[in-house]
């Protein structure tokens, strides 16, 4: 599968909590990290998503927000993945920041160069990737 999303995570469905229109899907990544996605019930049925099955989470890099010094902040975003900055690649306006999670997964984010400077992002710095559950697209192996 080739996709334009920079973040492609394979994992195992650990939870499916159905609501009236949408469902919350928990996905456990190989390193033990948890992702929560919100998708429609129709998508759950069409993809055959259920606990124990493999699924793939797709997240475009611009949808990944970054923060530092996050220990005393609570957010409504369901996914806050802590790690260390692996690299920062500058562009003319934006930069690609790669964070490595404790389990070895890499999260790619596109943020402004100003944000990189303001947050002090450089290799080795602790940072948190923040991803809204509604910004995760789920797929399943064919």
Image (cartoon, grey):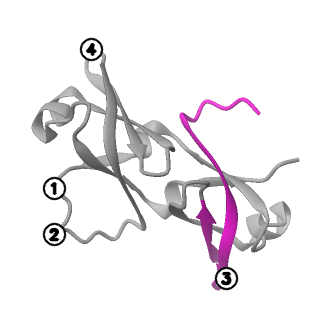
Disc 3 and disc 1: Cα gap in Å? 34 Å
Q: Is there CB contact under 8 Å for labels 1 and 2?
A: yes
Earlier residue among tags 3 and 1: 3
Kindly identify which residue carries mark 3. 18
Write the residue at 11% across / 38% down: 118
The answer to if 17 sits in the magenta stretch is: yes
Quarter holding the N terminus is top right
Image side of residue 82 versus residue 13, left or right: left
Percent position of residue 114, x then y: 15, 30
Name the residue tied to disc 2. 72
Q: Earlier in the sequence, mark 2 or mark 3?
A: 3
- Would you say the residues marked 3 and 1 are in contact, meaning their CB atoms lie under 8 Å apart? no
Residue at image point 49% right, 51% down: 103
Specify the farthest residue to the right: 142
**SS at mark 2?**
loop
The residue carrying mark 1 is: 69
Horizontally, residue 89 falls left or right of residue 20, namely: left
**x and y percentages locating residue 29 in the rendered image:** 59, 56
Mark in front: 2 vs 4: 2
């Amino acid at each position: 599968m080739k996709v334009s999303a920079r973040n492609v995570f394979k994992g195992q469905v650990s939870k499916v909590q159905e609501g009236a229109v949408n469902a919350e899907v928990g996905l456990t990544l190989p390193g033990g990290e948890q992702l929560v996605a919100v998708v429609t019930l129709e998508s759950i049925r069409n993809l055959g998503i259920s606990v124990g099955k493999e699924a793939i989470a797709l997240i475009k890099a611009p949808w990944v927000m970054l923060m530092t010094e996050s220990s005393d902040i609570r957010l409504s975003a369901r996914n806050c993945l802590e790690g260390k900055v692996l690299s920062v690649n500058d562009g003319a306006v934006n930069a690609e920041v790669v964070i490595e999670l404790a389990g070895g997964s890499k999260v790619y984010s596109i943020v402004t160069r100003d944000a990189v400077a303001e947050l002090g992002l450089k290799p080795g710095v602790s940072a948190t990737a923040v991803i809204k559950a509604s910004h995760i697209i789920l797929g399943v192996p064919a």
